[in-house]
Image (cartoon, coloured by chain):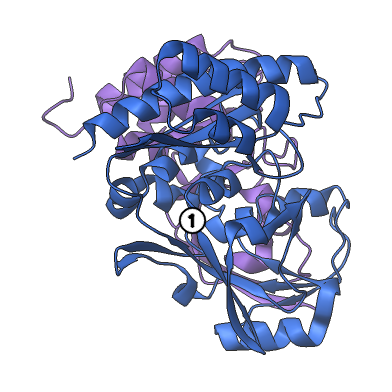
Chain colours: A blue, B purple
Amino acid sequence: MKPAPFTYHAPDSVAAALALKAQLGDEAKFLAGGQSLIPAMNFRVAQPAALVDLNRLAELDFVRVEAGELRLGALTRQRQLERHPLVKRHARLMWEAVPHIAHPQIRNRGTLGGSLAHADPAAELPVIVTALNGRLRALSARGERWLDAAQFFLGLFTTALEPDELLAEVALPPLPPDSGTAFVEVARRHGDYALLGVAAVVTVLPAGPQVRLVYLNAGEGPVVARQAAEAAQGRALTPPVIDEIAAVAAEHDLQPIGSLHASPEYQRHLARVLTRRALVTALERAVEAP
Amino acid sequence: MMHSVTVTINGRTYTRSVEPRLLLSDFLRHDLDLTGTHVGCEQGVCGACTILLDGQPVRACLMFAVQADGHTLTTVEGLGTPDKLHPLQQAFWEKHGLQCGYCTPGILMTLVAFLQETPDPSEAEIRAALSGNLCRCTGYQNIVAAARSAAQTMRPAAGGE
């Protein structure tokens, strides 16, 4: 047996799951797709006293559009995000990023909510939900609240969820007209955690384009490049301006910590290259936008 | 506390009592003696333990046996028999798609699902489909060749040769 012993609960309603978590507290973990939690348990890095398995909660597995917003249940499998026509139509950025998550066998189990609640700074989905100004619905036996992505991700593997709260749903608002998006990353092999990645959103306005850049593996969570966005304000995105924006992001907005495979300097180099590529593509798509 | 699990594997239904921490991969091998499913890294990277859960390939090492309750699984034992190999197994035989064979059950289960969804794959699509399975012997060339060959024989009559 690899994992340490735990008690197992498989509630068949959200209400029952919330009651269990309220009763068991922080020693219990919700089990969604398990593609990060179970490896951590196999190594005994994680030793929760109890698991509350969410996999019977079909009510958390949905993709729909409500009042123009894309609504995604937390238990939606990543494979479903990759294939669902509504995701492609309403959140092309997410549709473009999901195939970079591990491998099909992992995406068949891995869930949207699990990835967001795990809050790995190298993960794609937290970056995408941040770039699209998503809102996250947290449920507990006490009630519900909605959090903006900016409030939700607090740092390394840390979110604003209270011990009794369950991430139930994500809402992605539509982008303004004349917007384009792009996601690019560099990994050593397809499916590995990326050395660096960026999501770009460009909106073409009469006063000039607006740029939003969010990075993965460049800090303690999704890193929003505020200084780069300021540097872009009101300027035509010509190649020299794009170079300048990429340099500001790489030098001033990112805090890459480096790893065995990529020094912080190399990560900054990647940030410059990938930011240029992402901005050029996002701008093209913004101009093409219907 | 022990939990009861009832699961249908390769058309046969099994009921066992398990500890919650028992991995599905260990359950298959140790409790059911279905040792065709191999165990490599136990962190979801190598793909040796890939099986089909309700028709979709997943890592058996990243699920607990108790979670398989009520589901339908296919393991490599469900593909063919030594006398009558599955067309994919036949293609691996003919194209030398294996050497030591450790990774092979996981690769077969990955490809059998892939070829059902993608009956006429390009080489790039085959390589992408194989990205989640490590083989340290073959250099993948013959695995890709086997997948291409199997795609031809498995395709519905219209496309078969």
Instruction: From the viewer's perspective, tell me whether residue B19 is left or right of residue A122.
Output: right
Instruction: From the viewer's perspective, tell me whether residue A290 is left or right of residue A24.
Output: left
| Foreground pick, B41 / B87 | B41
Three-letter code for the amino acid on which mark 1 is drawn? Arg
Quadrant where the image shows the C terminus of chain A? top left
Is residue B17 positioned above or below A44 on the image? below
Is residue B100 positioned above or below A79 on the image? above
Q: Quadrant of residue B111?
A: top left
Residue A172 seen anywhere in this rendered image of the structure = yes
Residue B15 in the image, given as x and y percentages of width and height: 61, 72
Q: Residue at x 34, y 18 (%)?
A: B148
Question: How many discs mark residues in the rendered view?
Answer: 1
10 Å crowding of disc 1: few (<14), some (14-19), many (20+):
many
Residue A273 in the image, given as x and y percentages of width and height: 56, 15
Q: Chain letter for mark 1, please.
A: A
Quadrant where the image shows the N terminus of chain A? bottom right
Residue A89 in the image, given as x and y percentages of width and height: 28, 48
| Foreground pick, A236 / B95 | A236
Q: Quadrant of residue A49?
A: bottom right
Q: Residue at x 69, y 48 (%)?
A: B61
Instruction: From the viewer's perspective, tell me whether residue B133 is left or right of residue A46.
Output: left
Element under label 1?
loop
Q: Quadrant of residue B40?
A: top right
Residue that mark 1 sits on: A77
Residue A188 seen anywhere in this rendered image of the structure = no
| Foreground pick, A279 / A167 | A279
In the picture as drawn, the residue positioned furthest to the left comes out as B158
Q: Residue at x 28, y 40 (%)?
A: A178
Q: Residue at x 44, y 58 (%)?
A: B54
Residue A252 in the image, given as x and y percentages of width and height: 71, 27
